[in-house]
């Protein structure tokens, strides 16, 4: 399996995030990807490649031009306000909620940041745009490899992506890598017979961005297994009654589970998700591969073990679809490499 490694990921290195009234060190750290890379190389599980570059159109297929322009210029705007800002990250602090307008982009920088975000846990740093763009290119490159005939490919990219919407960042995410990969498979895969794509999100947190992007689409099935949003981030989306809208009705499947869920129960939800994907008739699969379902994860509540990830990989292989893996969450830094590579290993050599 080819692995597309975001060689620029460490340029995104947030200092602090807002948590319970205090600024605490970021959980989403560069060491996460370093550990996955080291484990890939240790087990020699395929070539580690730099991503190709793609033009703007591959990004505007998912994200709004207004949002992309903001991401590309945000840091310069921030430092232009005050040169001393260069030592601090941008952290959102004000948002338009119900009854406010979102059609007018404010001139005020803080207000602009709030228009394009939804939480105060996602710092935007000097290198965020460069890192996020290269990460998106990893996901697109992995999709490209699958279109060229590879059975599977892995985008080893951070920051993660599944919380990012068409025009907002949040939940440590800026560009929706999984959505970009899915759209690329559709846009470039017509000749290869790719007409319908499924996104399976196994991150602990509901992929609200991916769901929202494809919610009215009949050609992308979104299935997600995650902590119940009544108690778990991102709280305001991910309930079982969200089944899609309009032409996309029936193409969204949420499987929320309580804190404390282990693989015996989690894998039943996986069967339900895969049955939905099979019934939908997907021609290709994108897996939002979050490893924060691990029992040792510091911010999550499921109880999957390191061994369980081998079984997950085996099961995904048996789904029989060309598969793009996109790295998402996983904050037990010392375990995330072994756990992620276990999924890939289970997939390739069960
Ligand atoms: C991103 B991904 C922890 C608060 C949690 C947001 C979690 C984002 C998870 N102090 N804040 O889905 O792994
Ligand atoms: Zn997560």
Image: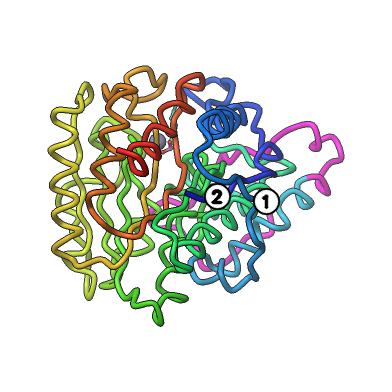
Quadrant of residue 10 within the rendered picture? top right
Mark 1, Cα crowd under 10 Å, few <14 / some 14-19 / many 20+, is many
Give the number of callouts.
2
- Asked whether mark 2 and ligand 1 are closer than 8 Å, the reply comes as no
Judge whether residue 99 is colored magenta.
Answer: yes
| Residue 95 visible in the snapshot | no
Q: Nearer the viewer, residue 321 or 222?
A: 321
Residue pointed to by mark 1: 129
Q: Nearer the viewer, residue 254 or 103?
A: 254
Predominant SS along the magenta part? loop
**Side (left or right) of 194 relative to 72:** left
Q: Extreme bottom residue here?
A: 191
Disc number for residue 174 = 2
Contact between labelled residues 2 and 1, with CB atoms less than 8 Å apart: yes
Q: Nearer the viewer, residue 347 or 182?
A: 347
CA gap between label 1 and label 2 equals 8 Å
Q: Secondary structure at mark 2?
A: loop
Sequence order check, earlier mark of 1 and 2: 1
Residue extent of the magenta highlight: 79-108
Q: Residue at x 50, y 31 (%)?
A: 43
Mark 2, Cα crowd under 10 Å, few <14 / some 14-19 / many 20+, is many
Percent of width and height locating residue 214 = 34, 64
Q: Residue at x 20, y 67 (%)?
A: 281
Percent of width and height locating residue 121 = 52, 34
Q: How is the image coloured?
A: rainbow
**Side (left or right) of 311 relative to 45:** left
Judge whether residue 328 is colored magenta.
Answer: no
| Residue 51 visible in the snapshot | yes
Percent of width and height locating residue 34 = 60, 30
């Amino acid at each position: 399996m080819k692995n597309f490694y975001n060689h620029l990921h460490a340029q995104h290195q947030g200092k602090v995030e807002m948590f319970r009234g205090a600024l605490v060190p970021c959980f989403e750290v560069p060491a996460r990807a370093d550990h996955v890379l080291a484990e890939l190389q240790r087990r020699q599980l395929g070539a580690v490649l730099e991503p190709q570059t793609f033009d703007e159109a591959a990004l505007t297929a998912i994200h709004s031009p207004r949002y992309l322009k903001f991401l590309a210029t945000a840091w310069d705007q921030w430092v232009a306000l005050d040169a001393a800002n260069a030592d601090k990250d941008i952290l959102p602090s004000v948002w338009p909620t119900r009854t406010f307008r979102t059609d007018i982009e404010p001139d005020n920088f803080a207000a602009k940041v709030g228009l394009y975000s939804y939480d105060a846990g996602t710092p935007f740093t000097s290198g965020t745009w460069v890192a996020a763009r290269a990460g998106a290119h990893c996901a697109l490159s992995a999709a490209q490899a699958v279109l060229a005939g590879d059975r599977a490919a892995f985008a080893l990219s951070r920051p993660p992506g599944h919380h990012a919407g068409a025009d907002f960042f949040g939940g440590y995410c800026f560009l929706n890598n999984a959505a970009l990969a899915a759209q690329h498979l559709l846009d470039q895969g017509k000749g290869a017979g790719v007409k319908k794509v499924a996104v399976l999100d196994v991150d602990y947190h509901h992929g609200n961005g991916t769901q929202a992007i494809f919610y009215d689409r009949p050609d992308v099935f979104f299935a997600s297994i995650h902590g119940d949003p009544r108690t778990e981030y991102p709280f305001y989306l991910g309930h079982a009654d969200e089944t899609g809208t309009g032409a996309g009705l029936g193409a969204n499947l949420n499987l929320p589970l309580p804190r404390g869920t282990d693989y015996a129960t989690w894998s039943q939800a996986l069967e339900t998700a895969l049955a939905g994907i099979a019934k939908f008739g997907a021609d290709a699969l994108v897996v939002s591969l979050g490893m924060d379902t691990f029992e040792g994860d510091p911010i999550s509540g499921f109880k999957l073990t390191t061994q369980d990830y081998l079984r997950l990989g085996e099961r995904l292989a048996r789904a029989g679809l060309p598969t793009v893996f996109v790295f998402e969450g996983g904050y037990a830094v010392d375990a995330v490499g072994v756990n992620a590579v276990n999924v890939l290993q289970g997939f390739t050599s069960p």
